[in-house]
């Protein structure tokens, strides 16, 4: 197969198959980073896409990796298309080199903790920070099983789903709230101090409504949503719970009624 080279700005030279030149018609090439972290992009009509994904026609649920250390070699034999479902836990975290013997786990030098991190269908998951590598491995297994990863990538393939779930929740009890729960709580607008007029979250008393003074309000995507006014405080709390579960699912913060 005929090979050709292209020179991008600042004399950066890339290698690719000559037959792929037709795919670049109308595109402008640019790049960011340097060394092993360099990334080449193809830009057209203001839309920027990684050159490796453009040349391989990788889908949203696929990732592309270079077989060699040369990130400027875009020949088809140097590009490999992988699925997130089977390989996302390997290539999802932004790190240079593997720091853990377990899948989906790496060591964060800033926090000095073990982190669970992986990608599934283009969505990144970073579950929590753990003091022990083994604790993070259990959490990684729990996340991989819930996302439907292949069994061959489990850290503890001999343990059943129930055993992993039990050990995970025992570990979770030692650490408290996960990142996803914290994010969900912040999205609900619960970071500020709870209204002292009510014992329930998301409920406040409006003296301008003498017949139905108890109002429910929740936050979603940065906007406040009024859920109505009620005669009884408990009814307003139930309305808030229903809407919170609808918007945020199992991570929602709800009232204990």
Image: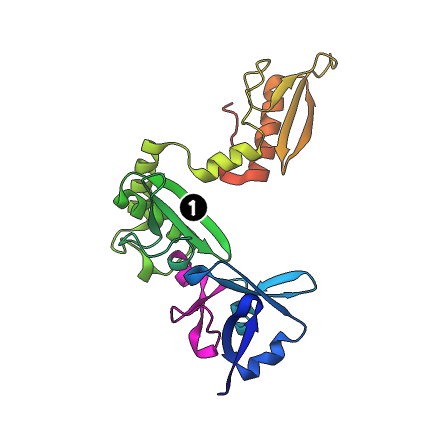
Q: Is residue 189 above or below residue 158?
A: above
- Image coordinates of residue 183 in percent, x first then y, are 51, 37
Q: Position of residue 182 (x, y in %)?
A: 48, 34
The colour scheme applied to this rendered structure is rainbow
Say if residue 101 shows up in the picture. yes
Dividing the picture into quadrants, the one containing residue 49 is bottom right
Q: Quadrant of residue 149?
A: bottom left
Within-10-Å neighbours for mark 1: few <14, some 14–19, many 20+: some
Based on the picture, tell me whether residue 65 belongs to the magenta stretch.
Answer: yes
Residue with the most extreme bottom position: 1
Q: Is residue 66 above or below residue 177?
A: below
Closer-to-camera residue (197/135)? 135
Does the magenta segment cover residue 32? no
| Helix, strand or loop under label 1 | strand
Side of 190 where 92 appears, left or right: left
In the image, taking residue 112 as reference, residue 48 lies left or right, namely: right
* Residue positioned most to the front: 10
Q: In the picture shown, does residue 14 fall above or below 153?
A: below
Which residue is located at x 57 percent, y 35 percent?
A: 187
Residue 235: percent from left, percent from top = 62, 22
For label 1, the residue is 126
Q: Residue at x 58, y 26 (%)?
A: 238
Q: Which residues are magenta?
A: 62-89
Observer able to see residue 252 = no
Judge whether 47 appears above or below 5 on screen.
Answer: above
256 displayed left or right of 188: left
Q: Say which residue appears at 57% left-offset and 32% top-offset.
A: 188
141 and 58: which is toward the camera: 58
Circle count: 1
């Amino acid at each position: 197969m005929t090979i050709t080279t292209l020179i991008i700005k600042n004399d950066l030279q890339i290698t690719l198959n000559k037959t792929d030149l037709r795919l670049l018609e109308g595109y402008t090439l640019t790049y960011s980073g340097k060394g092993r972290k360099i990334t080449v992009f193809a830009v057209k009509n203001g839309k920027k896409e990684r050159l490796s994904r453009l040349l391989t026609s990788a889908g949203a649920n696929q990732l592309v990796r270079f077989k060699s250390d040369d990130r400027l070699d875009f020949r088809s034999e140097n590009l490999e298309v992988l699925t997130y479902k089977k390989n996302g836990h390997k290539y999802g975290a932004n790190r240079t080199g593997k720091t853990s013997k377990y899948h989906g786990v790496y060591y964060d030098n800033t926090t000095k903790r073990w982190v669970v991190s992986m990608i599934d269908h283009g969505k990144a998951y970073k579950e929590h920070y753990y003091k022990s590598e083994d604790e993070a491995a259990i959490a990684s297994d729990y996340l991989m099983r819930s996302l439907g990863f292949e069994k061959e990538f489990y850290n503890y393939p001999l343990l059943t789903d129930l055993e992993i779930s039990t050990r995970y929740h025992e570990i979770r009890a030692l650490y408290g709230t996960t990142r996803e729960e914290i994010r969900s709580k912040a999205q609900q607008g619960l970071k500020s101090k709870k209204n002292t007029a009510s014992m329930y979250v998301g409920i406040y008393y409006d003296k301008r409504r003498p017949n139905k003074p108890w109002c429910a309000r929740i936050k979603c995507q940065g906007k406040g949503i009024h859920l109505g006014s009620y005669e009884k405080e408990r009814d307003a709390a139930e309305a808030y719970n229903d809407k919170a579960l609808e918007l945020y699912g199992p991570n929602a913060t709800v009232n204990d009624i």
